[in-house]
Structures are given as structure tokens and as C-alpha cells.
Image (cartoon, grey):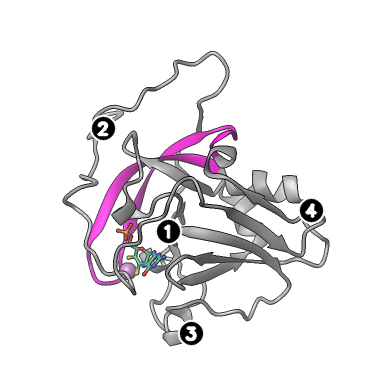
Amino acid sequence: MATALVGCGGNEPVQLEGVEVREYQGKDLSSVATDFVENTIKGPQYIDRDSYRLEVGGLVERPRQYTYDEVLDHQSYSKVSQLMCVEGWSVDILWEGMLVRDLFNEAGVKPEANTVVLYAVDGYSTSFPLSWFYDKDIIMAWKMNGITIPPERGFPFHLVAEDKWGYKWIKWITKIELSNDPNFRGYWESRGYNQDGARTGPKVGP
Ligand SMILES: Nc1nc2c(c(=O)[nH]1)N[C@H]1C(S)=C(S)[C@@H](COP(=O)(O)O)O[C@H]1N2
Ligand SMILES: [Mo]
């Protein structure tokens, strides 16, 4: 099920930081402050905005490090998408961020790359087929419900892994690596959770 993708560039109104949006196009949204369950592997991470760098590397022509502001300089997109944890809770959130494939295009993906591995500051990791980012217009968000993602929720960047279980929605992202190893297994995947992580598929197993 594809959700609408809305561009926010050009002459459209510039949105100023304000209070959280709780309803969007007639649909109720969850609360960023109270509807999430804290279940991360090392607890909340507090990343310093000024010293933060996002690394894009691996099988690319032009490996690069971005500051927080350089990431936000990209064309932004928004979509409502539901994060559902295997533990049985879910949240409906209006996400805003950039297309991950725009970073790939800047870096120049080498032809042998077929896998993307994402790493986070707490040692978490997960991976996906490269083609998925193009097929599903996958975004890496910096806002949830119109506000900057709070530290506890993943500042600076939270992957919006649409239609996948919550453990594929890596946050506090620090590194995006292009790889040719489809057998890479991330934190929960190497502990028995399914590699593909599709919500229509099995939770556990290879
Ligand atoms: N860096 C990092 N990202 C993570 C996790 C984690 O432990 N560390 N947990 C995952 C799991 S299991 C879920 S369900 C979601 C929860 O999203 P939230 O923490 O933004 O609520 O984060 C995912 N992303
Ligand atoms: Mo989860």
C-alpha cells in the first residue's frame, strides 16, 4: 500500500517550528510524547547537533560526511506512515525528511552494490536491498508530526521503513553503507528476527 508523497520545496509555504500536528488530512496521528514505547537496546541517545556527521560510504564513487544542516538542505518529502513493533504497539506519524536515494545519487553507487547497511550511534544496525529505496520512495525523517524529532525518538534521523516491522526503522542514524553483502544481518536480524521484516511476512526466521 503506497502512501502519498508530497514535495515541500519551491514556492510552497515554509513551515515554522510549532506544536505537534495531531491530525492530517482527516486522519488522527499518534502523540510523539506519549504513544511510543521505549524499548531500544541501550536506551535514549543524545546526539550533539553541531558535532554530528552522517557518513555515506562503502561501494560509492564519492564517500562523504554530511553535517546536520547539509542533510536538511535536501528536497523534503512527507508522508503518513505507521510504525508497528513486533511487541504489539503501533504509532501513526506524519514523517518529513529526504529520499534516501537522493544521498545514493550524490554519492554515486558502484554497480556491484546491492545492499544498504545502516548503523546508529547505539551500535544498532539493519540492512535492506538497494532497490527497495527506489521502489518505495523510502525517506529518512528529521521531523515527526511537524516537529524536529526529539532525542528520545531518534534525533537527528529516523528511517521510515514503510510496511516493515519496527526493528527495521533504525533511528539515531550515523552511517549509511553501500555493500555487496545481502547476507549482512543487523542487530535483531542476527538474533533471529526476519531479514526482510515485511509486516505481511514472518517475524522470525531467516
Ligand atoms: N538505533 C536504534 N534504532 C532502533 C532501535 C534501537 O534499539 N536502536 N529499536 C527499533 C525497534 S525494535 C523499534 S520497534 C523502533 C521503535 O521506534 P521508536 O523508538 O522511534 O519509538 O525503533 C527501532 N529503531
Ligand atoms: Mo520493536
Contact flag, marks 3 and 2 (Cβ < 8 Å): no
The residue to which callout 2 is attached is 21
What amino acid type should be assigned to the residue bearing mark 3?
Ser
Circle 2 residues within 10 Å: few <14, some 14–19, many ≥20: some
What amino acid type should be assigned to the residue bearing mark 4?
Arg
**Residue plotted at (60% across, 79% down):** 184
Q: Residue furthest front?
A: 51
State the residue in front, 71 or 134: 71
Give the extent of the magenta segment: 72-98
What amino acid type should be assigned to the residue bearing mark 2?
Val
Q: Quadrant of ligand 1?
A: bottom left
The residue to which callout 4 is attached is 62
Q: Which mark is residue 34?
A: none
Q: Which mark is residue 171?
A: 1
Circle 3 residues within 10 Å: few <14, some 14–19, many ≥20: some
Instruction: Identify the secondary structure beneath mark 4.
Output: loop
**Residue plotted at (82% across, 60% down):** 110
Query: Does residue 89 sit above or below 142 in this rendering?
Result: below
Q: Is mark 4 within 8 Å of ligand 1?
A: no
Contact flag, marks 1 and 4 (Cβ < 8 Å): no
CA distance separating discs 3 and 1: 18 Å
Q: Is residue 75 within the magenta segment? A: yes
Circle 1 residues within 10 Å: few <14, some 14–19, many ≥20: many
Query: Does residue 159 sit above or below 11 in this rendering?
Result: below
The mark that comes first in sequence, 3 or 4, is 4
What amino acid type should be assigned to the residue bearing mark 1?
Lys
Is residue 5 visible to us here? no
The mark that comes first in sequence, 3 or 1, is 1
The mark that comes first in sequence, 4 or 2, is 2
Instruction: Identify the secondary structure beneath mark 2.
Output: loop
Marks 4, 2: nearer the viewer: 4
Instruction: Identify the secondary structure beneath mark 3.
Output: helix
